[in-house]
Amino acid sequence: MAHYAILLYQPTPGDPDELTQEERDEHSRYGSQIEELGGKMYAPHALKSSTMATSVRGDMVTDGPFIEAKEVIAGFYVLEARDLDHALKIAKLCPANWQGGGVEVRPIAAGSTLPPTP
């Protein structure tokens, strides 16, 4: 099995603590879909709004996100999948992909340490 970083994007900064119950249920269903498709999710994390970010470039520390972008990273997790096609099939079902955002699937470099299985 291969491992992929799944980066979740949303169109505007938001706070995961402000998700509606319906949105939380949709995210839970997605976790079940991953298992049904034979994948495995490791270490899912939602991120606070990019407005709360602090960036470091060299010796300079500034408030706010590192780069200007149309979308912001809302969260991430590690996915175990058979191959890239399998990972993409799972990523297409992600709620972030259907809520005006998107999903980036990126292979994890060989030798990287994965979090322990939950």
Image (cartoon, rainbow, N blue to C red):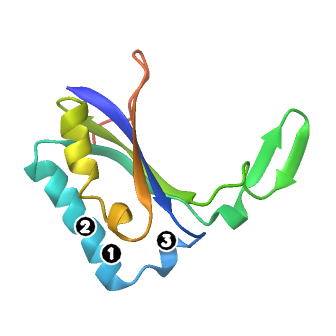
The residue that disc 3 covers is 16
Residue 58 drawn at (x, y percent)? 86, 32
| Badge 1 element | helix
Amino acid under label 1? Arg
Residue 22 drawn at (x, y percent)? 30, 83
Marks 1 and 2 sit apart, C-alpha to C-alpha, by 6 Å
Amino acid under label 2? Ser
Q: Nearer the viewer, residue 78 or 7?
A: 7
Residue 17 drawn at (x, y percent)? 50, 76
**Is mark 1 in CB contact (under 8 Å) with mark 2?**
yes
Residue at (80% x, 42% y) in the render: 56
Name the residue furthest right.
59
| Badge 2 element | helix
In which image quadrant can residue 112 be found? Answer: top left
Residue at (62% x, 66% y) in the render: 49
Q: Nearer the viewer, residue 5 or 111?
A: 5
Q: Earlier in the sequence, mark 3 or mark 1?
A: 3
Amino acid under label 3? Pro
Tell me the number on the disc at residue 28.
2
| Badge 3 element | helix
